[in-house]
Every structure is written in C-alpha cells, then in structure tokens.
Image: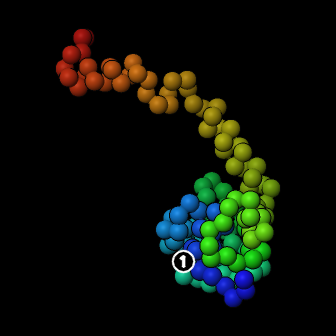
Amino acid sequence: MGAGVRIDKYLWAVRLFKTRSIAAEACKKGRVTIGGMSVKSSRIIKEGEEIDIRIAPITRRFKVLDVAEKRMGAKLTPDFVKDITPPDQLEMLELARLASNANRDRGMGRPTKKDRRDLERLQDGDWDI
C-alpha cells in the first residue's frame, strides 16, 4: 500500500489482536513498543519497522513487511507481518505452559457438579454437619 497506517488498525488487520479496541488498549497500557519506546495507538507504522508486544510472560517481536488497513484472512497475514520473536522467548513461553499444566491438581479446575451442589446446599442452609 505504501504511506502508513495507525498501529492499532494494523495490529487488528494482521490479526495480532481480536479487536481494534483491544489493540488500542494494549498501546495505552504500554504493552506495544517500537525501538524500546511505548507507542500511542495513533502512531503511524511503516514498512520495515519492528514491533514488540508484551504478552505475559514474554515479549513477542514482529516485523512489518507491508501495511494494511483492512482485516484479512489468516492465510494472508504472512505477506504483511513476520514473527521474529527470539527463540529464548518462545522457549520461556513453552516452559510456562508446561509448568501451569504440571502444577494443576486433578479436579482443581472448574468446579464439578458435586462441588456446585454442595455450594447450593450450603447457601440454602441444608448442610448436614
């Protein structure tokens, strides 16, 4: 395309964020940086720039290959953005994912039906001690 486009619009168009308002919020909270500096959602992005996005627990890095204003299908995004996240960051993400699964005790996720029934009995005052 050429000239440039707002960073929140670009991040939404290349499907890095689900909505434009979420992309703007990430900019506002300082999670989106270019060259180590936080950027406002109105910042114009150009080809060749590298964007860092802090997504806990890591920082992902993307290179702008071309600018786009309109949201595109997932198959088209490789022509517009390239993921250049360092391998050590991706390894940290995988370790965090494994750690979260390993520490979860069985049955400690969502409450079971039995847990729900017990809670309802407790709230209704039908609890037998």
Position of residue 14 measured from the top left corner of the image (x, y, whole percent): 66, 67
Judge from the rendering whether residue 91 lies leftward or rightward of residue 96; answer left or right.
Answer: right
Q: Nearer the viewer, residue 1 or 128?
A: 1
Q: In the image, what residue occupies the spot 32% across and 19% down?
A: 118
Q: Residues within 10 Å of mark 1 (few under 14, many from 20)?
A: many
Residue 49 visible to an observer of this rendering: no
Position of residue 64 measured from the top left corner of the image (x, y, whole percent): 74, 74
Q: Quadrant of residue 98?
A: top right
Position of residue 33 measured from the top left corner of the image (x, y, whole percent): 63, 73
Residue bearing the label numbered 1: 41
Q: Quadrant of residue 44?
A: bottom right
Judge from the rendering whether residue 20 lies leftward or rightward of residue 53; answer left or right.
Answer: left
Image height check: is 40 above or below 99?
below
Q: Quadrant of residue 103?
A: top right
- In which quadrant of the rendered image does the N terminus lie? bottom right
- In which quadrant of the rendered image does the C terminus lie? top left
Residue 94 visible to an observer of this rendering: yes
Q: Nearer the viewer, residue 96 or 71?
A: 71
Position of residue 122 measured from the top left corner of the image (x, y, whole percent): 25, 22
Number of numbered callouts drawn: 1
Three-letter residue code for mark 1 = Ser
Instruction: Name the outermost residue toward the left.
Output: 125
